[in-house]
Image: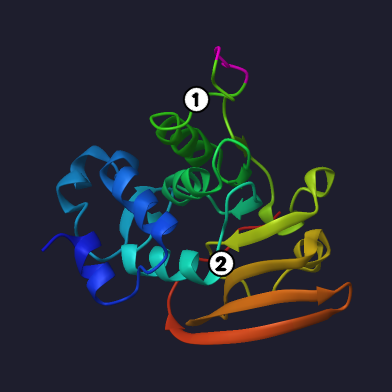
Amino acid sequence: MSLITKLISEKTLKTPAIISAFKRIKRSDFMLPQNKDEAESNHPLPIGSGQTISQPYTVAFMLELLGPKKKDKVLDVGSGSGWTTALLAEIVGADGHVFAIERIPELKKFGEANVKKYVPAPNRTTEGSSGSCVQFLCSDGTKGLPEFSPFDKILISAATPKIPKDLLDQLKTGGRLTAPIGKSSQDIVVLDKISKKEYKEKRYPGFIFVPLISD
């Protein structure tokens, strides 16, 4: 049984658009050469600079909680290998947009190169093509991208003690943010923005992430 089939049978993967993205976007294309033979393993693997490509179960779980849809504008904080960025881009489609922030320059280049295997580079439009829906930036993800806000969805893929206020401010009313919150271990928190100052929160305990790096 393939890993994706197992995640579907366990009902971790449920949404057709997310399942389709997992089938098309190959995890092996976002890994270091020496680890590609472990692409079907359900655990995190190193990608350099002390960071990892996340466990497939965790990525599937977070994307199902986040609920990205066609045409969404998504902020992907801690994009790392670019795997989650590419999955998001596949889900939101050419009429959506994914802004990927990575604090470590080497990983920003690594992730951007990986995503280009699936998504055309910006401004390389051709007749009948809407070009790229992904933009990579090397900056402090805790500050977000106010110039491109508000966002329909925000995904944070590294542990933070609390959700940065800047990211809460940049989330669209009616939007959703998913993030691992905590220190030695984390809860995956799902935050729905009901109004400018009102939020609805759910928590799912028992996860471990690398820490979110800020300036």
Give the residue number, with chain letter if any, for mark 2: 66
Element under disc 2: helix
Task: Give how far across and how far down residue 54 sits, in percent.
Answer: 38, 60
Residue 142 forms part of the magenta stretch: no
Q: Quadrant of residue 18?
A: bottom left
Which colour assignment does the render follow? rainbow
For the residue pair 138 and 117, the one nearer the viewer reads as 117
Task: Give how far across and how far down residue 41 sits, in percent.
Answer: 20, 61
Q: Residue at x 54, y 18 (%)?
A: 128
For label 1, count other residues whose C-alpha is less than 10 Å away and answer few (under 14), some (14-19) or many (20+). Answer: some
Residue 126 forms part of the magenta stretch: yes
Give the residue number, with chain letter if any, for mark 1: 120
The region drawn magenta spans 123-127
Element under disc 1: loop
One can see residue 167 in this view = yes
Disc 1 residue type (three-letter): Pro
Task: Give how far across and how far down residue 93 sits, in percent.
Answer: 54, 41
Instruction: Estimate the spatial distance between the alpha carbons at disc 2 and disc 1, rounded to whole Å.
Output: 25 Å
For the residue pair 83 and 126, the one nearer the viewer reads as 126
One can see residue 162 in this view = no
Q: Residue at x 22, y 52 (%)?
A: 39
For label 2, count other residues whose C-alpha is less than 10 Å away and answer few (under 14), some (14-19) or many (20+). Answer: many
For the residue pair 33 and 23, the one nearer the viewer reads as 23
Which badge, 2 or 1, comes first in the chain's sequence? 2
For the residue pair 151 and 183, the one nearer the viewer reads as 151
Task: Give how far across and how far down residue 110 sits, in percent.
Answer: 44, 36
> Most prominent secondary structure in the magenta stretch?
loop
Q: Residue at x 59, y 69 (%)?
A: 178
Q: Is residue 161 above or below residue 176?
A: below
